[in-house]
Amino acid sequence: MKIRMNVNGNWREDDVEPRTLLVHYLRDVAGLTGTHVGCETSICGACTVLLNQEAVKSCTVFAVQANGAQVTTIEGLAREGKLHPLQQSFWEEHGLQCGFCTPGMILVAHQLLCRNPHPTQEEIRKGLEGNLCRCTGYQHIVKAVQSAASKMSATEPVRAVAAAG
């Protein structure tokens, strides 16, 4: 089946089997390996991407369901060789250890900050529910999201990642 979608600002058209999960399409067809395959049961959130600006677990979506949609992966956040403030803050605040959960955490945090540019610690923790980390204990992740919120509000209004092209 032929599908067409905007991935990180670029339109793609590919043939896929109808049963291909979005996570496998992104990794195996599009070559975007920043989206991780974790539990494949929607529990861990390592495969989280933005689908039409909504954080979704890409192991629960067929690629054909994303036909015509805008998909943003962790690779799509950086602009002109510069890390997105969330990516930079995760680095600076030690919000990652092994890094396996990090792409999903960053994308769900992006959705949170688009909806609430100045979240409390409690709101951040609530917003990250459904994305699991086995290494950090979450405190540094929360600090990273707080730091990114400050950076993003200081430089420009928080906005969703816009599709280009």
Image: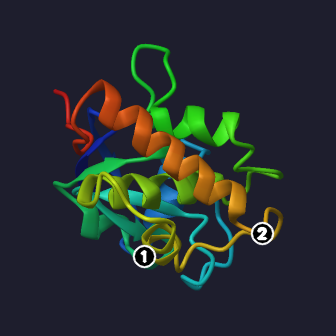
The colouring scheme, among rainbow, by chain, secondary structure or one colour, is rainbow
- Res 46 quadrant in image: bottom right
Q: Amino acid at mark 1?
A: Arg
Q: State the image coordinates of residue 7 (x, y, percent, origin top left).
A: 33, 42
Q: Is residue 82 above or below residue 160?
A: above
Q: State the image coordinates of residue 12 (x, y, percent, origin top left).
A: 29, 39
- Res 105 quadrant in image: bottom right
Q: Is residue 55 above or below residue 6?
A: below
> Mark 1 to mark 2: distance in Å?
35 Å
Front residue of 147/5: it is 147
State which tag comes first along the sequence, 1 or 2. Answer: 1
Front residue of 61/86: it is 86
Residue lying furthest front: 120
Secondary element under disc 2, as helix, strand or loop, is loop
Q: Residue at point 36% right, 72% down?
A: 18
Mark 1, mark 2: which one is toward the viewer? Answer: 2
- Res 65 quadrant in image: bottom left
Quadrant occupied by the C terminus: top left
Q: State the image coordinates of residue 93 (x, y, percent, origin top left).
A: 69, 41
Provide the residue designation for mark 1.
19
Rendered image: mark on residue 155: none
Q: Residue at point 70% right, 66% down?
A: 138
Q: Is 160 on the left or on the right of 21, as rendered?
A: left
Q: Is 11 on the left or on the right of 112, as rendered?
A: left
Q: Amino acid at mark 2?
A: Gly
Q: Residue at point 33% right, 29% down?
A: 154
Provide the residue designation for mark 2.
137
Front residue of 90/60: it is 90
Can residue 30 be seen in this snapshot?
no
